[in-house]
Amino acid sequence: MDTPDDPFAGGVLRSAEDVTLVVEDGVIVARGDLADVTRDHPDQAVVDLRDGVLLPGLVDTHVHFPQVRAIGALGMPLLEWLERAALPEECRLASEDYAREVAREFCFGLISAGTTTALVFGSHFAGAVDTLFTEAARVGLRVTSGLVVSDRGLPAELLTTPQRAYDEAIELAKRWDGVGRSRYVVTPRFSFSASEAILDACAGVLDSMPEVLFTSHVNENPAEVAEVARLFADHDGYVDTYDRHGLLKGRSVLAHNVHATDPELAVLAERGTAVAHCPSSNSALGSGLFPLRRHLDAGVSVALGSDVGAGTGFSIFKEGLQAYFMQQLLEGDGHPLSPTQLLHLATSAGAQALGLGDRVGDLSVGKQFDAICLRPPGGTALNIGLRHASSAEEALGKIFALGGDADVADVWIGGRQVVSGGFSRAALG
Ligand SMILES: [Zn+2]
């Protein structure tokens, strides 16, 4: 099952009970009936996956590398959660040995959840970001990440200067951007912790290397939004703190945007900035109900993110389900989500948000073979549900309602199988 045509614009779920893909050098080069395909490609080994459900690899458009060990600190709003749960852990990544361990846990977490592509919010420490890129390259993940920069409002050890932020970003971007599957993203943490000078330094990196991406947070929580309005009193709202500094002119993704104004949505649509919707995090921190319909009406692209530390784990299936729940609860502005729309948000919409729509996101000829095969253990509700589903769409609804890491049996990235027959630590070496 996949969603090559946008189901928010009339596209329907593409599914087949019995379809054969030919993969050469990591790329899908043919798709059709087994008999036709084997006639044209007689020397290819055949892998039979008819005991499972094959989906495109999942795409996470907002996930914090340093927060693996901070997951599960419930009961606090954003600013208190940052101070008490997230930032003390982020400080520990000053140690590269510590960061290396966390990088392994982080990449393992993504792959075991079926995530093959991610826009990763990095660390405040250049050495830690380097360990992440190194580990992602080792396991083959498609990762876009970068140095997180702040120069106020956070613990002193997480702060930098505009000049150092620029220099370290350029050095990391030159080392990793476009190398294998790695790409670089310019990442001020949020305007809350950024001076105008450091936002200008970020713009300087984008001027020097226009192919790299931009990401940050926006309009997540009312107290944060109010403080940003105070800090940037001469700006026209939170989105403008980035836009006025030229940060939204290239490929850009902003996380959350729960409390967006209509003029801000118009700016995001105009700039082509995508929004990473992180519904578990928005619920856990009490940030609010994401106005999906207003984003879609304004023409702003939306995809899913796990956020991770403030979220509840790596599973993008769970984010899809939580997005569905929240739209059900959002009176007036809610957008009911079909299983096909959830799959699109979890795969092709994410790929497009990251500028990778021509490479991944569905299982069409010409795309990289990034895929997962779900094979729920016998006796589980998902196993029973899939065996009794009367249509592909119904099966997909069950996958989002019931699916999790334990159901992800096989994972391929760029044609290389990185998980086989269920997850074990041995799979990552
Ligand atoms: Zn975040």
Image: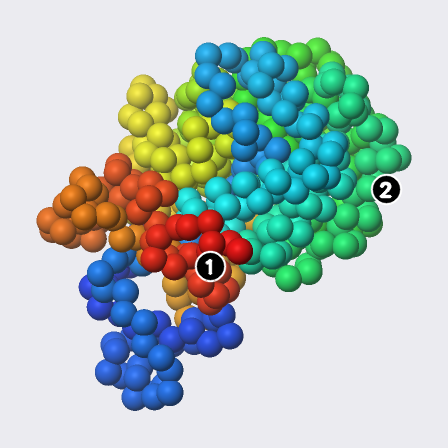
Specify few, some or many for label 1: CA neighbours under 10 Å numbering under 14, 14-19, or 20 or more: many
Q: How far across and how far down the image is residue 193, in percent? A: 72, 21
422 relative to 243, above or below? below
Q: Secondary structure at mark 1?
A: strand
Seen from the viewer's position, the closer of residues 100 and 39 is 100
Q: How far across and how far down the image is residue 371, in percent? A: 40, 58
**Label at residue 88:** none
Seen from the viewer's position, the closer of residues 145 and 418 is 418
Specify few, some or many for label 2: CA neighbours under 10 Å numbering under 14, 14-19, or 20 or more: some
Quadrant in which residue 149 is drawn: top right
How many marks overall? 2
232 relative to 41, above or below? above
Q: Quadrant of the N terminus?
A: bottom left
> In the image, 295: left or right of 50?
right
Alpha carbon separation for disc pair 1 and 2 = 35 Å
Seen from the viewer's position, the closer of residues 303 and 148 is 148
| Kind of residue at badge 2 | Asp
The residue beneath circle 2 is 167
Q: How far across and how far down the image is residue 323, in percent? A: 37, 31
The residue beneath circle 1 is 418
Q: Earlier in the sequence, mark 1 or mark 2?
A: 2
Q: Residue at x 36, y 35 (%)?
A: 318
Seen from the viewer's position, the closer of residues 59 and 94 is 94
The answer to whether residue 11 is visible is: no
Q: How far across and how far down the image is residue 114, in percent? A: 41, 49
The answer to whether residue 156 is visible is: yes
